[in-house]
């Protein structure tokens, strides 16, 4: 018989979004799939929603190998369909060309919001729709044995989050979760318009704790660092930092509420099933490394394969280091660290 100290941890994953930086999340998931833990539920927003859906569909169809293959298929298609692939380092003088190229990407990102309304193929998310449709079998996430999956989108009308569960996750729902309004037109579902889930739930934590997965641990895989000590004063740098702060605000709020209420639940030994579930769940945060912030304002739209591979490798390395420090805590204790002082207090 196994006890709480020897049983495999039951891990619920909360996957943050971040454009092309989602390839970092791919690397993290690859490393976690190598570990002797049981993944029991997934929540995600934006790129985290795409990673989460590819993960759950792959696990349902082919176990861990199916998940690895599904994630790689997704990101190879993202890069393969990118107009930036022609400018990859293998074809150009990297050290000389790269700074100029990244600067041009920053300008393109800044001007994109003004150009996109006149480009229907951008506004309707045509390229991303095709990629997801060709690489992820959405019928797999509705199978009876598929893991619980929740993806977030934001209601344009009132700014609240809507969570789509397995049977509700369609191609439109995934597009809504990844819909940045400065580039894409709102996605219309069930009579309502939706934008990127990062505005309201980046990612949603509640269903992982209060659902039926009976997770022993919840791990938040962060893509946007809470702090960035080297913020550029340029217009593109300022706007990028504003976006990062906005997309982390809901995560900070949720973590503050969860940690405070969990402390009460553990001390009071409440009879409420929800309070008991919260008290029993160990909370973990795999903080985004500073290298992600250092990649620059435009790196979230840089989908060249060389950059995807770098991000994937960074994700694997970060997960490796995190597991070296915290693997022993899974199934036993919370290791949540790395929050700004105002929240951690």
Image (cartoon, rainbow, N blue to C red):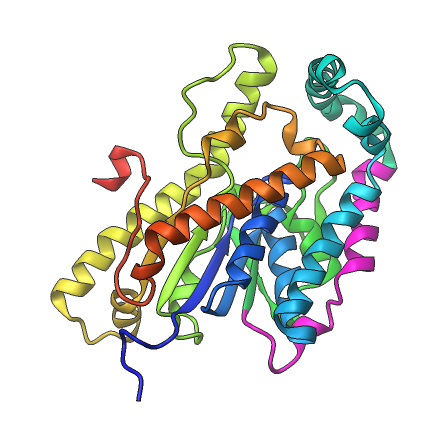
Residue drawn at 33 percent across, 54 percent down: 326
Residue 327 appears at what percent x and percent y? 36, 58
Of all residues, the one furthest to the top in this rendering is 233
Q: Tell me the quadrant of the picture where the N terminus can be found.
A: bottom left
Residue 187 appears at what percent x and percent y? 72, 48
Q: Can residue 192 be seen in this view?
A: yes
Residue drawn at 62 percent across, 44 percent down: 312
Residue 170 occupies quadrant: bottom right
Of all residues, the one furthest to the left in this rendering is 268
Residue 94 appears at what percent x and percent y? 74, 20
* Between 119 and 229, the one nearer to me in the picture: 229
Residue drawn at 64 percent across, 72 percent down: 167
Q: Is residue 222 magenta?
A: no
In magenta, the rendered stretch is: 121-148
Q: Quick check: 237 left or right of 141?
A: left
Q: Quick check: 214 left or right of 244?
A: left
* Between 71 and 318, the one nearer to me in the picture: 318
């Amino acid at each position: 018989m196994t006890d709480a100290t020897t049983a495999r941890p039951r891990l619920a994953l909360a996957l943050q979004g971040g454009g092309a930086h989602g390839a970092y999340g791919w690397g993290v998931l690859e490393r976690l799939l190598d570990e002797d833990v049981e993944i029991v539920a997934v929540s995600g927003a934006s790129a985290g929603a795409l990673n989460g859906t590819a993960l759950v569909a792959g696990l349902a169809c082919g176990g861990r190998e199916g998940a690895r293959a599904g994630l790689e298929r997704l990101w190879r298609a993202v890069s393969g369909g990118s107009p930036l692939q022609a400018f990859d380092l293998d074809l150009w003088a990297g050290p000389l060309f790269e700074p100029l190229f990244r600067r041009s990407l920053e300008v393109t990102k800044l001007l994109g919001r003004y150009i996109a309304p006149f480009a229907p193929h951008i506004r309707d998310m045509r390229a991303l729709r095709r990629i997801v449709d060709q690489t992820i079998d959405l019928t797999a996430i509705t199978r009876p044995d598929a893991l619980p999956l929740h993806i977030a989108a934001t209601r344009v009308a009132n700014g609240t989050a809507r969570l789509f569960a397995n049977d509700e996750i369609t191609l439109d729902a995934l597009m809504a979760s990844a819909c940045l309004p400065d580039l894409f037109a709102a996605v219309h579902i069930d009579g309502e318009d939706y934008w990127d889930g990062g505005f309201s739930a980046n990612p949603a934590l509640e269903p992982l704790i209060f659902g039926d997965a009976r997770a022993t641990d919840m791990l938040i895989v962060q893509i946007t660092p809470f702090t960035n000590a080297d913020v550029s004063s340029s217009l593109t740098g300022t706007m990028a930092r504003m976006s990062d702060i906005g997309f982390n605000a809901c995560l900070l709020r949720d973590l503050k509420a969860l940690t405070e209420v969990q402390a009460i639940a553990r001390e009071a030994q409440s009879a409420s099933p929800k309070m008991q579930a919260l008290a029993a769940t160990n909370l973990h945060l795999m903080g985004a490394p500073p290298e992600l912030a250092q990649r620059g304002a435009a790196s979230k739209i840089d989908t060249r394969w060389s950059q995807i591979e770098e991000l994937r490798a960074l994700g694997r390395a970060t997960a490796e280091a995190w597991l070296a420090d915290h693997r022993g805590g899974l199934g036993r204790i919370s290791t949540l660290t790395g929050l700004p002082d105002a929240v951690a207090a």
